[in-house]
Amino acid sequence: MQRIEAFVFDVFGTVVDWRSTVTRELKQFGEKHNAGQTNSTDWGRFAQEWRRGYIQYTRRVAAGGEGSKNVDVMHRQILDNMLQSEEWGHLGALWDEQQRQQLNLVWHRLDGWSDASPGLYEIKKNKIIATLSNGNVRLLVDMAKHADLPWDAVFSGELFDAYKPNPKTYREALRHLSIEPSQCAMVAAHIYDLRAAAKEGIKTVYISRPQEESEPLGPEGVKSKAEGGEIDWVVKDFHELAKIAAEA
C-alpha cells in the first residue's frame, strides 16, 4: 500500500471553533455598538443562523446553483439578509456599512480547537498538511495567522471555482499536490465531506467536534473500517492523528 504523503483538512468546525468565536465576538460587537438595545439578543442563535445560511448556500452552489465562490461575499450576503428579517431587523437598523464590514471579518479570526495548532505542528513533521476548505484564500490565510495554523498549502473552493462536496474540489487538490488519491487523507468533522472524498479514492479521517455533525449517524456513531465502519481512521484529537501520520 502506498504511504500517505498529505493530509488535507476541512477547516470550519474541524480545525477551528467557529461557534464559540463568532458568538463571543457578536456579543462584544453588540455591547460596543448600541449595547442598551441588544442585551437580550441570543447571539448563539444569530451565529448558528449565519452558519446555517453558509451551509445552504455552499451546498446549492456545489450542486450547480448560482452564487459567489468567495465566502466573504457570501457571508456578507447572508448577514444583510438576516439583518432585513423580522427577527434580526432591529440590529440592521443599528449597524451601518462600516460596522457590517467589520463584523463580516469575524470569520477571519476564528480560534482553533485546543489541539489544533500543536497537533498540526506534529503532523507537519512527517506529512504535507493543507486546507481543503470552502473558505476563500484571504480568509484562510488570516485565520492561519490568527490561530497559528502552520499549513504547507492553502486550497480553497475559490481557487477551484467550486465548493465541497463537488468532486472537482478533491480532484484539484490531488492534482496540485501531484499525488494519487491513495496517497492523500481527508480530515473532517463532517461525514458528508469524507464520503465525497472517499468516492474519489481519498483516505478518510473523522474527528468528532462538539455540535458539528449535522448528518444522522445512528446509535453507534462513526466507526472505522477496522470496526466495521466506512472511515479509515476515527480519532479523538489531532495528537492521535499525528501518531497515525507518523506511521501511515
Image (spheres, grey):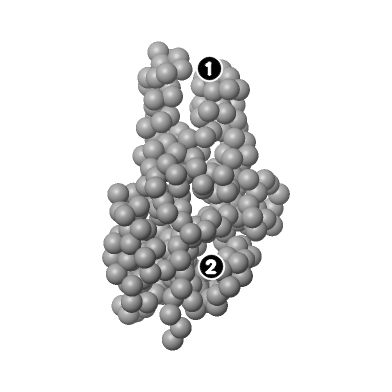
Residue 219 in sight in this render:
no
In this rendered view, identify the residue nearer to me: 141 or 33.
141
Question: Disc 2 residue type?
Answer: Ala
In this rendered view, identify the residue nearer to me: 9 or 210.
9
Q: Position of residue 50 (x, y in %)?
A: 51, 38
Residue drawn at x 47%, y 69% as measured from the top left: 6
The residue pinned by badge 2 equals: 196
Q: Position of residue 86 (x, y in %)?
A: 55, 26
In this rendered view, identify the residue nearer to me: 13 or 126.
126
The residue pinned by badge 1 equals: 94
Residue drawn at x 63%, y 39% as measured from the top left: 73
Residue drawn at x 45%, y 39% as measured from the top left: 109
Distance (Cα) linking label 2 and label 1: 42 Å
In the rendered image, the quadrant that contains the C terminus is: bottom left
Query: Who comes first in sequence, dot 2 or dot 1?
Result: 1
Query: Residue most toward the front?
Result: 125
Q: Which mark is residue 43?
A: none
Badge 2 crowding class, 10 Å Cα cut-off, few under 14, some 14 to 19, many 20 or more, is some
Q: Position of residue 89 (x, y in %)?
A: 55, 23
Question: Disc 1 residue type?
Answer: Leu
Q: Position of residue 227 (x, y in %)?
A: 31, 78
User: Quarter-wise, where is residue 156 in the image?
Assistant: bottom right
Q: Disc 2 on helix, strand or loop?
A: helix
